Amino acid sequence: MTTRATVTASGRLSLPADIRRRHGLAKGGEILIQETEDAIVLRTVDQVLAEARAIARAISGRGGAGVDAFLAERRAEAERE
């Protein structure tokens, strides 16, 4: 979906209400702005965190890549030594 928006003279950009609602920003919220070589990408903090968690799970080879799981694995390794 492509939507057109205007940047004001003061640099403000207003996201359309339907887009804000779909992405959980209806009552305000924080977004991250990523600048690539040829684009500007807006993503919600939740989207970025979900991607980071998925990457961590893939790298770890486990379903639970949280700190608790990591520490439990380290403790188990220490006990085996």
Image (cartoon, helix red, strand yellow):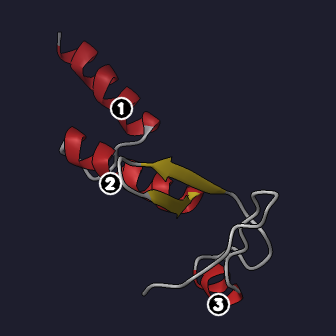
Label 3 environment density (alpha carbons within 10 Å; few <14, some 14–19, many ≥20):
few
Instruction: Say which quarter of the image contains residue 7.
Output: bottom right
Q: Dot 1: what SS? A: helix
Q: Position of residue 40 (x, y in %)?
A: 48, 57
* Pointer 1 or 3: first along the chain: 3
**Residue drawn at (21%, 40%), measured in percent from left and top?**
59
- 45 and 18: which is toward the camera: 18
Where 3 sits versus 80, above or below? Answer: below
- Locate the N terminus and report the quarter of the image it occupies: bottom left
Judging by the rendered image, the residue that carries numbered circle 1 is 70
- 4 and 70: which is toward the camera: 4
* Residue that extends furthest to the top in the rendered view of this protein: 81
- 20 and 76: which is toward the camera: 20
Where 56 sits versus 3, above or below? Answer: above
Judging by the rendered image, the residue that carries numbered circle 2 is 54
Q: Which mark lies nearer to you, 2 or 3?
A: 3
Calculate the distance from the C-alpha at mark 2 to the C-alpha at mark 3.
27 Å
Calculate the distance from the C-alpha at mark 1 to the C-alpha at mark 2.
15 Å
Q: Amino acid at mark 2?
A: Ala
Instruction: Say which quarter of the image contains residue 23.
Output: bottom right
- Locate the C terminus and report the quarter of the image it occupies: top left
Where 21 sits versus 14, above or below? Answer: below
Judging by the rendered image, the residue that carries numbered circle 3 is 18
